[in-house]
Amino acid sequence: MSVWEVLAVLAAGVGAGAINAVVGSGTLFTFPVLLAIGIPPVTASLSNSIGLAPGSLTGAWGYRKEMAGQRTRLLRFGAMSLLGAITGGILLLNLPESVFTIVVPGLILLACVLIVFQPRINAWMRTRRPARPNGGPLLPFGVYGAGVYGGYFAAAQGIILIGLLGSSLDEDLQRVNALKNALASIVNTTAAVFYIVFAQPNWLVVALIAAGSVVGGYLGARFGRKLKPLALRILVVVIGLTAAVQLLLT
């Protein structure tokens, strides 16, 4: 890679780490850059997943205060995220990319709808049944599905997770975002280990994205924790709609 290509990948890593900590969909920063400099799609996807794993950990650490009291949720949903990430990694190495590109925009749009109507959904659900601190029996399967998607491609998995968790848990959006970061870090780390063992990443790309995402994840967490719930909800929806449009046009 040329010096300019190295700087472009590094800058994309910073942006991806920051946006992953605040919302999710940081892959939409890095993936197009990798394709533009000539990295094959599958190699770009798995190298990107490995590179973003350190940034997702720093983003989750930045939200550690909002994770207080969510240990049970983390254990319950974390196991499903881990299994989902392994499933997604297997799919990436065995299925054509066209399979998920058909359904991904729809999943993102559905997540955006859930986020927009989350307060009304939560209010309606409280009138129908008592609040469930862990979201009911079906939420783990949704988290598993998000893990499958995250292990396969990762773009906008955070938006999908916020949509699922926010509409199912009677919880403040910042605490939902903290849980999202923790689960996404499990998915990204699991996928990274899987690809290191079973695939052949581009290690220069991995190093550049990792370095950028660590810085971006820390900065994004500091910024995201200061956002009001309405501002965070608007940011999630705007980025989610942008992600869906970008994927539809590619």
Image (cartoon, grey):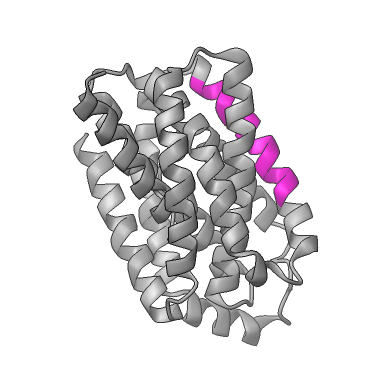
Residue 165 visible in this rendered orientation of the protein: no
The residues colored magenta run: 78-92
Tell which of 214 and 181 is nearer to you. 214
Whether residue 219 is in magenta: the answer is: no
Question: In x, y percent, where is residue 22?
Answer: 44, 61
Question: In x, y percent, where is residue 63?
Answer: 59, 64
Q: Is residue 191 left or right of residue 18?
A: right
* Picture quadrant of residue 179: bottom right
Tell which of 16 and 164 is nearer to you. 16
Q: Is residue 57 above or below residue 30?
A: below
- Residue at position x 43%, y 81% in the image: 228
> Residue extending furthest front?
3
- Residue at position x 23%, y 22% in the image: 37
Residue 193 visible in this rendered orientation of the protein: yes
Whether residue 83 is in magenta: the answer is: yes
- Residue at position x 23%, y 48% in the image: 245
Question: In x, y percent, where is residue 117?
Answer: 43, 75
* Picture quadrant of residue 151: top right
Q: Quadrant of the N terminus?
A: top left
Question: In x, y percent, where is residue 78?
Answer: 71, 49
- Residue at position x 64%, y 34% in the image: 190
Q: Is residue 244 above or below residue 43?
A: below
Q: Is residue 123 left or right of residue 205?
A: right
Q: Is residue 139 left or right of residue 38?
A: right
